[in-house]
Amino acid sequence: MAMRLVERIRFLFRIFLLFTFLAAVATISAITTIKLTIQGNQETLPDWVGVNLDTATASAADMGLEVKVEDKLFSDKYPADEIISQEPQPGIKVKVGQHVHVLVSLGPPRIVVPDLLGSSARVAQILAVQKGLTVGDIAEVHWPGLETDQVVAQDPPPSTTEIRSPAINFLVSVGENTLAYVCPDFLGKKLDSVAPLVQRAGFSVNKVTPVTGTTAPPGTILSQTPVPGSRISAGDSFTFQVAQGNNAAAPPPAPAPSAPH
C-alpha cells in the first residue's frame, strides 16, 4: 500500500514537471513571437536630407511612415522643396506608422522685408502677405504717445534681405498705460469732506442726488457710483446720493473738477 502511494506521488510529480516545462516553452515562444513581430514592424530611416519633398513622401509611404513638414525656411544650400533636416535622424529604426518631421527649403531668399512701422496691425499683415511673407507672432505693449493698434517694431527689420524664415513678427501698441485704482468706500462720510478729496485725486463729482426720509445726518453719503471696490481710472466721475433733512435745503452742487496732479 505504501509502495503504491509512493509511486502515485512520483507519477504526479512527473506530470507537474512536464506541465511546468510545457508552460515555460509556451512563454518563451510567445516572447519570441512578440519580438519578431515588433522587429518586423520597424523600418530603418533612409537619409532624406537633400531629397525632394514629394520623393521623400512617396518613399515614406511605401515604408508605412508619414512625412510631416514642421516648417519651411529659406536656404542657399538646398533648392526649393528639398528637405533641409529630418527627425528622427537617418539610420534610426522606427515603428511603422510613425511620423518623420522635416524642414523644407524655400530656396534662396528673394524678398526684401518691407518697412511696416507705423502701419496698423491689419494693414501690416496684408502688406506682409502680399510681399510673400507669413505673419508670425503679434505681441502687444503699452506705448506712450502712440495710437492703439500701431506697429512699433518688426522682426526682421525693414530692408533685410538675409533672412532664414519667411515669418515676420510684430510689436503693436495698445496705447497709453492707464493707471487703474480700487474705488474707495465713501458710504457714511460727509459729502463736503469727500468732494475735495475726489477732485484732488483727479476724479470729478458728476451728480449729487438728495434723499429725504432717512435717519442719517444731512450731507451723509448713502450710495455711490462707482461702487466701493470697483476698478476706476483717472478722470472717472462719481455720482452720490446724499441724506437731506426733511426741512433742509438741498446740498449745493459740487465745485467743478480740477485737473489731476
Image (cartoon, grey):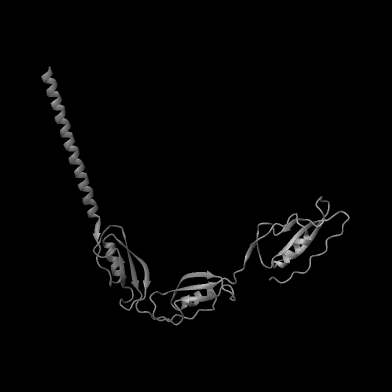
Q: Position of residue 145 (x, y in %)?
A: 60, 76
Q: Position of residue 144 (x, y in %)?
A: 58, 74
Q: Is residue 1 left or right of residue 70?
A: left
Q: Position of residue 135 (x, y in %)?
A: 46, 72
- Please name the residue shown 31% across and 59% down the image: 98
Residue 100, compared with residue 214, is above or below; it is below
Q: Is residue 255 left or right of residue 227?
A: right
The residue lying furthest to the top in this view is 1
- Please name the residue shown 48% across and 76% down the image: 154
Nearest the viewer among 227 and 184 is 184
Quarter of the image where the N terminus is located: top left
Image quarter of residue 252: bottom right
Image quarter of residue 247: bottom right
Residue 55, compared with residue 63, is above or below; it is below
Nearest the viewer among 142 and 130 is 142
Count of labels shown?
A: 0
The residue lying furthest to the right in this view is 247
